[in-house]
Structure formats: structure tokens, C-alpha cells
Amino acid sequence: MTDDEILAEFRAAEALLEGHFILSSGLRSPRYLQCARVLADPARASRLASELVARLPQEIRSSIDIVVSPAMGGVIIGHEMGRALGVEALFVERPDGVFELRRGFRLEPGQRVLMMEDVVTTGLSSREAITAIEAVGGKVIAAGALVDRSNGSVDLGVPFFPLIRIDVPSYAADALPAELRAIPAVKPGSRKEVV
């Protein structure tokens, strides 16, 4: 798939939004990719995951024992990546504000993990998920995402493989351009609080 074909999947799902959005990081942006909408269609989610798996270097793809994703956003794409790789898919969640494995999930010591996200902007959630995975014995060998919107600046400490990179500006709330200040802000993601 080309980048245009991937973006066409987002447009077809009405998942590429324009306006004034508050990101999970607290930054503001004029564009938002609502991955939950693009992943709502199981066939589309499978196509996107299969495409990302095909783009992983063979030495990484063949080394992955398990996929672990941060809840909420990474759960569906993590599951689809597990299916495409033929491995289990688990998730970490934050019942008390810190990621942890729950629900009887566990990792074997040294188990090689692909940490999978939906969207990466600052990388904070991804790094927190990696820390939680490593705290219970997993070895994160790579990270993946449907979308990298960090403008190429994110460093997760492991090789990072996004399906698509979208360079969209983001701004601090006190440094908005006039066109964004003129539009009411919307918080479309899964987390209500702004970090």
C-alpha cells in the first residue's frame, strides 16, 4: 500500500478529521486521525496490520514472540498485529494511572515483545508501556504504530516502525495560531484528562 492508499482507508472510515483538537499529550492540532474509526471495520484493520507486518524487517518480524499494546487505543491494532504475526496479543492498562499487565496476562522472562500503538505523538504513552512491559520481564525489541505524528522526533529507545508518518503541526495551548484560537477545541480521544 502507498501512503495515499493508507490515507484513503482513513478517509473512507471518516477517521481523518479537520478542526481544533486537544491531543492526549495536551498539545493542540488542526488534524486528528481517529484510529478507532478506521479499526472499526475488521477487514480494514486486518489489511492495515498485514501491511505493517510486511514492512517490518524480517529479522525483527521473525523474532517477535508476543504483541503488547497500551489500552485503550492500541488494543485493536495490537490484536490485529498478533493475528498477522501468528502470536498472542496482550495489553497493559492504567487502572491507577500507571500501566500494568492485568486480567491474568503475563510475560515469560525475556519474551520478545512488539509494543504496538495506534498513534504516537510525543511517545510518552509508548515509553510508559515499554517500561511496564520490561518491569514484568518482557524484552521490547521493536515498537510499531499505525500513525507517527511526531514529525520524526520521537525516540522510544527501540526500533520504531509506523505504518504512516503524518507531519501535522501541534501547538501548546498558550501558543496557538490565530486560526486555531478561532475554533472551539474538541477532545476526541479515549482519555478525557489532558496530560
Image (cartoon, grey):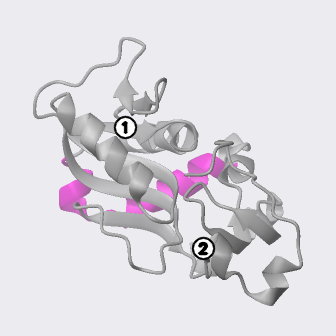
- Judge depth for marks 1 and 2 and give the one in front: 2
> Which numbered disc, 1 or 2, marks the residue that appears first in the sequence?
1
Q: Residue at x 57, y 44 (%)?
A: 73
Residue 101, horizontal then vertical, whole percent = 35, 24
Label 1 residue SS: strand
Residue 179, horizontal then vertical, whole percent = 83, 86
Q: Residue at x 73, y 87 (%)?
A: 177
Camera sees residue 9: no
Camera sees residue 192: yes
User: Depth check: 97 or 79 in front?
Assistant: 97
Q: Residue at x 27, y 20 (%)?
A: 106
Label 2 residue SS: loop
Q: As displayed, is residue 2 above or below residue 46? A: below
Rendered image quadrant of residue 55: bottom left
User: Depth check: 48 or 152 in front?
Assistant: 152
Rendered image quadrant of residue 130: top left
Inspect the magenta stretch and tell me whether residue 16 lies in it: no
Inspect the magenta stretch and tell me whether residue 60 lies in it: yes
Q: Residue furthest left?
A: 110
Q: Judge left or right: residue 49 versus residue 45.
A: left
- Give the quarter of the figure containing the N terminus: bottom right
The label on residue 68 is 1
Chain part drawn in magenta? 44-63
Q: As displayed, is residue 65 above or below residue 24? A: above
Residue 67, horizontal then vertical, whole percent = 35, 39
* Label 1 to label 2: alpha-carbon separation: 30 Å
The residue tagged 2 is 172
Q: Judge left or right: residue 142 versus residue 194.
A: left
What's the residue type where badge 2 is placed?
Answer: Ala
